[in-house]
Amino acid sequence: YLKATEGGDFKDTKFQENWLKAREHGFLVGAYHFYRLCRDGQIQAQNYIDSVPNKPDALPPVIDLEYDSNCINTYSKEQLLAEIQIMHDQLKQHYGKQPIFYISKSFYNIVLAGQFQNVPLWVREYESQPKLKNDPKWTFWQHTNQGKLKGISTAVDLNVFFGNEKQWLDFLAQNKINQK
């Protein structure tokens, strides 16, 4: 997954190049958007749609939801949930795939618990396996941001999929992604 956009107007200047290079090397590729808590969901969805190609073999879109101290008091919880719903629905309609929420534990427990129950979760939790309020299932777990990979000089995020190989292939099939 590559960062594509943030808020209503930020676009990663390396996104298109990174997207093409990753695809050239045979990687399954998807993009994520860092959600700004003080921007309308419609504006943020359009920023993502304007930046990320609608490729049938791409991984589902990801909306990164975590606390943004510059914007924390812009919307009430109810308004924030409505704005997130708008972005979620627009990405789902445009790309034809169920978006994934990348979440911090605190954001989930305070804002999202009990909401969006059919949205797959990608949890950032460095202390131990994810333990969220109401114990929802998670799909991905980012367990460190200090990983090392051959060929990359800086630290990288490392993630795991919750499931076995068959479940991974089922996840890809649900998203109409053919493994070559």
Image: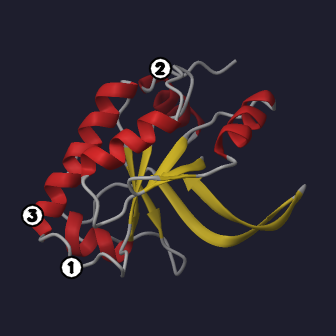
Residue at point 58%, 55% (across, down) = 160
Disc 2 to disc 3, how far (Cα)?
33 Å
Q: Quadrant of residue 149?
A: bottom right
* Residue 141: percent from left, percent from top: 51, 60
Element carrying mark 1: loop
Residue at point 28%, 35% (across, down) = 90
Report the amino acid beneath label 3: Glu
Residue at point 36%, 63% (across, down) = 36
For label 2, the residue is 176
Q: Earlier in the sequence, mark 1 or mark 2?
A: 1
For label 1, the residue is 73
Q: Residues within 10 Å of mark 1 (few under 14, many from 20)?
A: few
Disc 1 to disc 2, how far (Cα)?
39 Å
Please say whether residue 163 is visible from this viewpoint: no
Please say whether residue 128 is visible from this viewpoint: yes
For label 3, the residue is 78
